[in-house]
Each structure stands twice: as C-alpha cells, then as structure tokens.
Image (cartoon, helix red, strand yellow):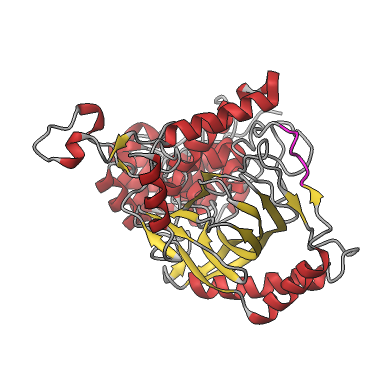
Amino acid sequence: MTLKHTIITWALFLSSTTHSAEYGVDVSFPMHHGFVSNNYAELPWNIDPSFETPAEYQDMAVQPLGNRQKFYDEMIEGCVQYYGKKGNKCRDYETDRVQMTLRQPQSMENYTDIGFKKLKAPDNVWKLVKEFWDANKDQQSKENGQQEIPIVSIISSFLLIENVKPPISYQPNLNIICLIRPANHWAAETRIVNIENTKLRGGGFTLKNAIWDAAKSTISQWTGAELKECSLYGIRVYATGSVLSAHVDRLPLVSSAIINVAADVEEPWPLEVIGHDGKAHNVTMEPGDMVLYESHSVIHARPFPLKGKYVANIFVHFEPVGHSERHEVKIGETDPHEKYKRDTAAGIGGHEADPFGEVEERINSLLPPYIVPGSPEVPNYLESHPESEAAKLAAQTKQDGTTSAHFLAAGGDLEKLADLIERRNDLASKPDRNGWTPLHEGVRSGNVEVVRYILSKGVDVNHRTGSGSGYSGLALAHKLHGPLHPITKFLESMGGEVMEPEL
C-alpha cells in the first residue's frame, strides 16, 4: 500500500464519528504481541485466494494501515534516545504494557455489551467546564513527572504523574490522583489546566464535584452498577504529534469517561477502542462530547499523531461496588457448586485441578467484584495489592498450611467436606503449621456430624495439636464447649481422652 493510498484510506476511515473497523488487536499498535501485523492487504494471498498463505501469515490480521511497525519502532527509539542511559526502560515499559493488555481484558467482569458509548456531556456540567477552560486556558503548566522514566517496579506499565519513584511495596492512593499517562511525552509535551486549582477562576471543589456527580450518574445508568469515585484528572492538553499507546487502565480504574473540552485540529484525532466484540472502533470527539468506556477491559489508544495545535480532555474514573443490575446478583457472589461445574467444564477449576478449592473460593470472594475468579489477573492482583484481604488470606494459607478440609470442617459443610476427602483421603488428618487437623476444627465448631465423619476416615480421636503435645479433641471440647455439650459427649463415647499441653 502506497503512502497516498494509506492517506486516502485513513480519510475515509474518519468520515463518521464512530467507525467499526475490520480489524482488531495488533494492527494499529502492538496490543497482544510486541509487534503489529505486516500482512499487508496488497500481498498476493490477500488479493487472490488461489495463492497459498504462508504459515507465518495464516493467523495474522490483514494490515490496511500501512507500515505501522516502522512507525512504532521509531516512536520507541525516540523514547530510548530521550532517556539516554535509562533508555532500556522504555522497552521494559512496552513489555509490561503488552502483558497487561493481554492479561487484564480476559480477566475482567464486563458491565456493558460493547464496552463504550459516545454521548453529549450533561449541559450543566459542560457549561461549568467550558467557562473554566475559556477563563484559564492560558494558565497551562507542565505535567509533573515527564522527566521520569515510564516504568516503576510494581506500578509498571505507566508513567507516574508525581515526580516520585516509590519502593516495591508502594500502593498508590488512586482516590487522590490519576497515576497513569501512556503518552509519548518525550516527543510531545502534555500540559495541565488543573480543575482543582482554587487560584484559577472557577476551579476547585464546586467544579470537581459537579463533574463527579454528573459522570457518576451517567456511567452508573449505563453500566447498571453502583460506583465509587476513584480518580478525576485534567484538563490535560495534548500537543501536536501526541500519540497514546494502546493500553487498559490499571485497577481500580474500571468505569470511566473522557470529556472533550476543546480542540484545534487539522483533522480528527480518533480514540481507538477495542470493543467487547474484538473489533477496533475509532471514535471522533467534538468539544462537549463525552465517551464512556470500560477502561479496565477495553484496550484504548490514540495511535495516530495529533495533527493540529491541541486537544484538551478531562478523565473521570470509577470503581464498581455492590450490586450490578446487569448481573442480577451482588457482583463477586457466585454459587460455589455452579462455579465448580463451570470451572471443571472449562478445565480451569474444580478439586481435580486444585484439591484446596475451598481456600481458593474464599480468596475469590474477597477479590474486587470486577475480577473474574480463577483468571490470569488474580495472581497479579494478589502480588500488587499485598494489603488486600484476599492477598492476606492467600499469604496466610500458604504460610500456615491451612487446607480446604480445615475450612469446610470449621464451617460445618459436611457435604463438601466428604466430597473432598473421598478424593483426597490424606486431607482428613493433614495438620496445619500449628498441628490443627480438620478434626480439631470440627470440634471447635461443635459439629458432631462433621467430627463423626472425620473419625470414620480412620483419624485418631486423640490426635493432639502442636507437635503431638498440645490439645486432644476432647480437651478442646471441654475447654470450648463444656462437659455437657453434645460434641463432648460424642468424643467421650468414641474413646476420647482429655490431653492438654504440659505447663
């Protein structure tokens, strides 16, 4: 395809405000791989079906946009040159970005059918935003962090807005600032007109809260989910030549909106989104337009350089919480039996794959509602959010040796306990780090039927906690429930003895 043909194709491509392309990922920009398609439309096998497609092109999308690989390589080389000795981090950034765009979308709960929607910003909010811009558009400041290399350990993939390099354990407060900016800042500096700046006319909490409220109401109605404010950032001003790498937003930025505040462009600068249909959609925006998008799972980019003077946008992000009308249940609450059947059928779950499935279910129940249990994102989330309850439980389980049998015995779930032990008889007597077995958990819960079942599997009624010098089951029963409790009487009938730690 010649440059002339590419330009004509692109002009036709932008003739409507939202264009659904005949391609998906790895065409305009690397998304699932570190390269873009070079399966050009003019190659013989793409013109004449009688030509056999070479093996290396058989699963590759047709490339209608020209030599995008050359554009991408030159863009990244510009980053490398800009950062000098630290330039190798530009390529590290790209590796993380591609891994994230591959891993995260498949791991997320989606709240809409297609993943994005374009509409007009609410009149009352648009009036405030436009008045603020008109009064302060000349008060732009350089966006912080543009001299920092765009990768920081656990934060990875995106450039920190604040000029700080945190330690591995750092957990960003996304309720305060937006931490990501995947723009080619080394070639086209971005600037800010801060809507929170009370020194600017109309700036401050009145404007910010008006944007919050309008966006929250609009996005909640669109997704059918309850939302919690997460991040509001802008007005960010993109300059001539700006390009935004294809990315998904780092959690908990999930349900989002872009408000186009102002623009002076020679031609539209489309927002490309990969919808839930797997196709690229190029959305053009006029001032006053608002695009809603599921930023956690919809890959989005502006892969073509901005032609013109500037585009100014506001970004608003929310995190879903609680009930979702779309899912008709409290998100994250899945019937464990149905989950077992579903996961087993998919070959990714069930006790055959994980004999400690109950532990996994408990961890899954503590995950944010927008992460699919058992998905590739779960290990990444647990690692990057060590202070979360899910991560703490996972770490505790790994550390203290707790099994599903311990949890089921403690919870009195005899049916599931029996189902597990019939396939893994060794779990009936398996101790945790403190020497507690499912027998002791059953005694602690006071459930006679659970204890009866465990003993029927050959477990010693007098097995002691610790290293064999702690409490027997009957000693625990006396200590926790007293001599008249049914569990105490039952253990006595089974030959239990009172054995306590020696002082």
Q: Where does residue 34 sit, x and y in percent of width and height?
A: 44, 31
Q: Residue furthest bottom?
A: 124
* Left or right relative to 54: residue 3: right
* Left or right relative to 222: residue 49: left
* Left or right relative to 397: residue 426: left
Query: Is residue 132 shown in magenta?
Result: no
> Is any part of residue 150 visible from this angle?
yes
Image quadrant containing the C terminus: top right
Corner quadrant of residue 123 = bottom right
* Left or right relative to 378: residue 86: right
Query: Is residue 147 shown in magenta?
Result: yes
289 and 451: which is toward the camera: 289
Corner quadrant of residue 433 = top right
Region rendered in magenta: 143-148
Give the prevailing secondary structure in the magenta stretch: loop
Q: Where does residue 281 sit, x and y in percent of width and height?
A: 41, 57
478 and 364: which is toward the camera: 364
Image quadrant containing the N terminus: top left
Q: Where does residue 325 sit, x and y in percent of width and height?
A: 46, 73
> Is any part of residue 475 visible from this angle?
no
Q: Residue furthest left?
A: 50
Residue at 72 percent across and 38 percent down: it is 170
Residue at 69 percent across and 46 percent down: it is 179
Q: Where does residue 225 sit, x and y in percent of width and height?
A: 52, 69
151 and 357: which is toward the camera: 151
Tell me: residue 155, above or below residue 84.
below
Q: How many marks?
A: 0
